[in-house]
Amino acid sequence: MNEKYELLEHIHKDASMATYTLTKLIETLKEKDNKIKGKVEDILKEYAQYETKVKAELEKHHIKPTGEGNMAKIMSTMEIKKEVKSDNSDAAIADMLIKGISMGSIEMEKKVKDYRDRVDKEQLQLAEDFLKFQQQTIERLKEYL
């Protein structure tokens, strides 16, 4: 891949994995009475918007975006089911999401710093917006702890 688009590819992978994981979490919580479900659905919509936007940007440059591999998705699904089975309280779900989003946010922050001088302003702005979204999402989830 052209280094010029690696930052966009990273955003796409992160947003794609989050979309997949949040969808699985919502499916797992379907029969449960959690107040956090609405918040999770809102977060899913925002991640999906980033995924779509970045995918379109990559395709505009004739780059086929890739997501995380099947093994990562299988592990994610298993972890969600295990965690929800162990404790499906809103606090436990918020904690799980905060930890996952925090890992993505840390990686995104590193990428923004690494690529700051190597990508155009629009890509950098998109990455910074995505990072800000992740950080705000963490703050919004803290109300459930």
Image (cartoon, helix red, strand yellow):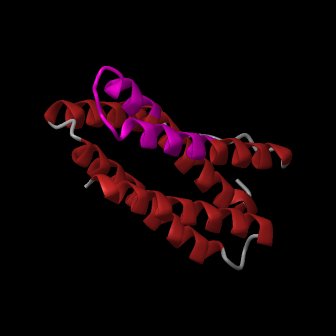
Which residue is depicted at the point 72% across and 58% down?
A: 5
Q: Residue 119 at x, y = what percent?
A: 75, 70
Q: Residue 15 at x, y = what percent?
A: 56, 47
In the rendered image, the vertical position of residue 29 relative to residue 142, given as above or below: above
Asked if residue 39 lies in the magenta stretch, the reply is yes
Which of the two residues, 141 or 135, is positioned nearer the viewer here? 141
Q: Residue 132 at x, y = what percent?
A: 56, 66
Residue lying at the far left in this picture: please name it: 86
Which residue is depicted at the point 69% across and 41% down?
A: 52
Which residue is depicted at the point 78% across and 43% down?
A: 56
Asked if residue 27 lies in the magenta stretch, the reply is yes
Residue 94 visible in the displayed image: yes
Q: Residue 140 at x, y = what percent?
A: 42, 57
Please state, as top left, top right, bottom left or bottom right, where the C terminus lies in the image: bottom left
In the rendered image, the vertical position of residue 30 relative to residue 34, given as above or below: above
Which residue is depicted at the point 85% across and 46% down?
A: 60
Query: In this rendering, would 134 be left or right of 139?
Result: right
Query: In this rendering, would 21 be left or right of 34?
Result: right
In the rendered image, the vertical position of residue 80 relative to residue 43, given as above or below: above
Q: Write the start and end of the magenta stretch as one range.
A: 23-48
Which of the two residues, 20 or 46, is positioned nearer the viewer here? 46
Q: Main secondary structure of the magenta part?
A: helix
Where, by quadrant of the figure, is residue 51 drawn? top right
In the rendered image, the vertical position of residue 133 relative to residue 64, given as above or below: below
Residue 68 visible in the displayed image: no
